[in-house]
Structure formats: structure tokens, C-alpha cells
Amino acid sequence: MEFKRYILLVAAVLALSNVGKAQSEKVEAARVSFITTKVNITPSEGQSFWPVYNEFNDKVKAARKSFKSQYHAQTEFKTDKEAEDFLNAEVKLKQTEADLQKEYIEKFKKVLGPKKTALLRKAEEEFKRKLIETIKGNGNDS
């Protein structure tokens, strides 16, 4: 299973329950804190940055949700056309994500500057890596 899909699956499972919702909120709060610290986002930068960052994440989530709503239940393809449609939709999703990232990196640079925007990308990846390590660790403790 592709790594990103595994994380999306974990996030989806968490989001389906009240306990999961509280856990998702904790993860989100930890992400904000982690990024703020790693990037050294000042309070004045944060006032401008976080609404734009949240808008970006909302658009990415909406694109993924749209894709999932169409293809989530599909576990096999009966025709070549169904397979082609899925592949084309997946490529379109990846392109949409890349386009959003390109658009919003420019917006982030206007608020944070290039150095902090680059640090933001590094911090996001580091946070994902640490989250996965935590999830794996919790799975091994059972």
C-alpha cells in the first residue's frame, strides 16, 4: 500500500469516530505547534500565514475527497475504460495537488519569505515522518 494512502486511511479511520475526531484535533494542534516552532513563525506572520495555509489544506482535502467519493469503493475494474478513467482521475488529482502547491508556495513566500517557506516544506515532511513513527510505535505496543 502506498505510504500516503496508508496515512489517508489512518486519518479517515480516525475521522470516523468521536475519539478519532479528538485525536485528529490533537494531531492538528501538534502540527501547528511543530511548524510554528520549526519555521519560527512570529505572531504577526501567523495571523497572515495560518488562514492561507488552512485554505491550501482545505483545497487539497476537497480534491482528495472528490477523487475518493468517485473511486473509493472500486476495488476492481470490469473494463479497460473503467481502468483508464481511474488512472486519468488519479493523474488529474496529482496534477491538482501540484498546481495548488505551486500556487500556495507563492502565497506563503509573500507572508514568510523564501527561506521560511522552504523551512515550512521541510517541517511538513518531518512532522509526517514523526507522526508515522508514532503510529508505528503505538501499533507495536499492543
Image (cartoon, helix red, strand yellow):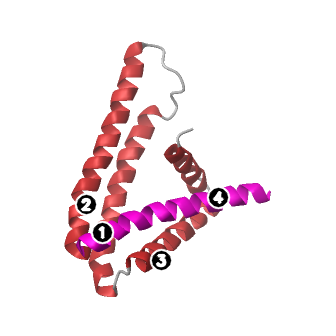
Q: Quadrant of the C terminus?
A: bottom right
Q: Between tags 4 and 1, which lies in front?
A: 1
Instruction: Please rate how many residues cluster around mark 1, counting C-alpha atoms within 10 Å: few if below 14, some from 14 to 19, many from 20.
Output: some
Residue, disc 3:
33
Q: Which residue is mark 4?
A: 135
- Residue under label 2: 104
Q: Which mark is residue 117?
A: 1
Secondary structure beneath label 3: helix
Q: Residue type at mark 4? A: Ile
Residue type for callout 2: Tyr
Q: Which residues are magenta?
A: 113-142
- Dot 3: few (<14), some (14–19), or many (≥20) neighbours within 10 Å? few
Secondary structure, mark 2, is helix
Is 8 situated above or below 113? above
Q: Tell me if label 2 and label 1 are in contact, CB under 8 Å.
A: no
Which quadrant is home to the N terminus?
Answer: top right
Q: Position of residue 22 (x, y in %)?
A: 59, 67
